[in-house]
């Protein structure tokens, strides 16, 4: 299912209203893909917003891990999702590095070195 157009990450709920554990992994993977898309577009504000969203989803996942376990097929799916998330993260970091190096140069430049002279 494609992500909602309003930028929110889809929350899938199991019968009874609570999201299933594997569905939480799916939501994190979906947010990770959206974050990569934003990084490819150099929309760093959106990357930061989605990073916050991932942080919230991970906190929910950690809490859910206390009460639910994954079956064998869900464990395989979990590993597949985690590999995708790690690949997304690696590409996001690679795309952010030039920007971070530029920021570092500005921070460490001697006083007045980055001023525009009339």
Image (cartoon, helix red, strand yellow):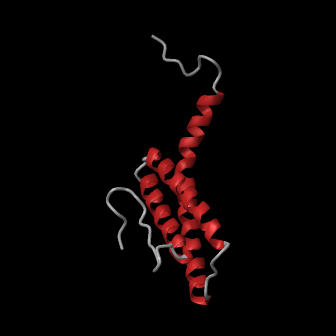
Q: Residue furthest front?
A: 16
- Image location of residue 9, percent across then percent down: 43, 62
Image location (x, y in percent) of residue 51: 53, 53
**Residue, far bottom:** 72
Q: Is residue 39 above or below residue 109?
A: below
Q: Residue at x 48, y 17 (%)?
A: 116
Furthest-left residue in this view: 5
**Where residue 89 sits: x, y (%)?**
56, 60
**Number of marks in the rendered image:** 0
Above or below, comparing residue 54 to residue 84 in the picture? above
Q: Is residue 4 left or right of residue 90?
A: left
> Residue 75: x and y, percent?
61, 83
Q: Nearer the viewer, residue 60 or 112?
A: 60
Left or right relative to 97: residue 2:
left
**Furthest-top residue in this view:** 118
| Quadrant including the N terminus | bottom left
Instruction: Name which residue lies at 65% across and 72% down.
Output: 65
Please identify the quadrant where the C terminus is shown: top left
The residue nearer to you, when weighing 81 against 56, is 56
**Residue 11: which quarter of the image?**
bottom left
Q: Quadrant of residue 62?
A: bottom right
Residue at figure coordinates x 47%, y 46% from the top left: 44
Q: Residue at image x 38%, y 56%?
A: 7
Res 59 → quadrant: bottom right
């Amino acid at each position: 299912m494609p992500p909602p157009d309003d930028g929110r990450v889809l929350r899938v709920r199991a019968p009874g209203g609570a999201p299933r554990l594997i569905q939480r992994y799916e939501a994190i993977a979906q947010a990770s893909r959206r974050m990569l898309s934003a990084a490819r577009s150099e929309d760093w504000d959106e990357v930061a917003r989605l990073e916050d969203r991932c942080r919230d989803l991970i906190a929910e996942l950690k809490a859910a891990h206390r009460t639910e376990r994954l079956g064998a097929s869900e464990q395989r799916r979990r590993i597949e999702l985690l590999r995708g998330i790690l690949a997304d993260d690696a590409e996001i970091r690679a795309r952010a590095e030039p920007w971070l190096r530029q920021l570092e140069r500005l921070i460490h430049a001697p006083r007045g070195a980055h001023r525009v002279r009339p």
